[in-house]
Amino acid sequence: MIFYHYYYYCYQNFNTLEQNFDHINDDLLVKYLLNEATTDEQEQVKQWLTDDVNLAYYNQLQKIWDDSRQLSLTSTVDENRAWQRFQEKIHPAAVRRTSFSWTRIAASIAIIVGIGVLGYWIFNDRAKEITVVAQEAVLNDTLSDGSVVTVNKGSSISYLSKFKGETRQVSLKGEAFFKVTPNKKKPFIISVNDVRITVVGTSFNVRTINGNTEVIVETGIVKVTRGGKTVELRANEETTVGAKDSALTKEKVSDQLYKYYRTKEFVCDDTPLWKLVEVINEAYNSHVVIGNPALKDLRINTTFNNESLDQVLNVISITFNIKLVKEGDTIILQ
């Protein structure tokens, strides 16, 4: 019913417009309105507009075009009933005016339809680029195909409001978890750094840090491509692509720490201390460092469920008999 908005609005202006039909070709006026007229045609219209009556007619045509663009988006009219009223009123009106040219009626309606088509294309069919930035908190975003993206704080994604063509393209900076709606005919593609990630319907985590790209798959199949080389990942597999890696390799997922920003849990399963500290600093925006290199590879098995930084560090201290030393905003494990 998108075109109805234009018909309905134009009917409200119909009586005024039809009083001034003795003018140059309406097609030429529309071309002039849309800046498509030739130089000679522009000059012809400008001469015609020197007449006050003609200028008023042109201004009404332009007003219909301008106002109808907004009307199509904001109208609350009962479209079906109003369309019936429009038909009931417009046909008797045309019958009574027997001296009025049916050709001109048809031409005028055709012009309005043309404007409606153009307005629909401009305002309803044009895909806009959207960028979602998670600055201070984790954000959830649903794309036009129903796919859901959880964007970690400090990260961003960009995509079109409506996916067009044969693929669904998204670009990522930082970290995000994707739960992609299946569509084998339209692959979902993520561009991050110089890595291309292709799926048709799956769930997986993508993280970039210090030029490296980490992909962890929870369900389905994910293809990771870089420099013409591809590795295929399945559930519970991951790959880390370095800035200068010449080969792509995969391995089993070693722990569940990557989920922390979605679940509020730190799940440590034989996790090295250095990796836990890295995630702690990301989650709490803290500056925890390991002062003694011998502590980096100590393994921990536990789960922290939405606990404070002090609580987490206290467990680490007790578990490994580590001292916590504070120097300004820095916390040193030694």
Image (tube, grey):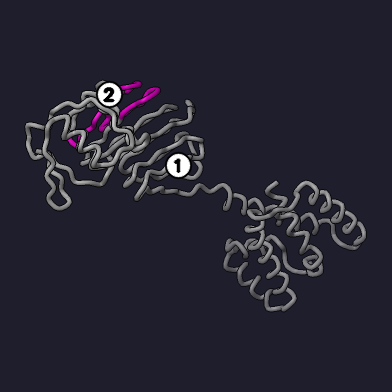
* Residue at (50, 47) in percent of width and height: 127
Q: Earlier in the sequence, mark 1 or mark 2?
A: 1
User: On the image, which quarter does residue 71 sit in?
Assistant: bottom right
Query: Which secondary structure lies at badge 1?
Result: strand
Disc 2: which residue: 253
The span shown in magenta is 216-244
Residue type, mark 1 in image: Asp
Residue 224 painted magenta: yes
Q: Which of the two residues, 259 or 12, is positioned nearer the viewer here?
A: 259
Crowding around mark 2 (Cα neighbors within 10 Å: few <14, some 14 to 19, many 20+) is some
Q: Which of the two residues, 296 or 202, is positioned nearer the viewer here?
A: 296
Query: How many numbered circles does the render carry?
Result: 2
Q: Which of the two residues, 219 or 84, is positioned nearer the viewer here?
A: 219
Residue type, mark 2 in image: Val
* Residue at (11, 38) in percent of width and height: 323
Task: Tell me which secondary structure the magenta stretch mostly adopts.
Answer: strand
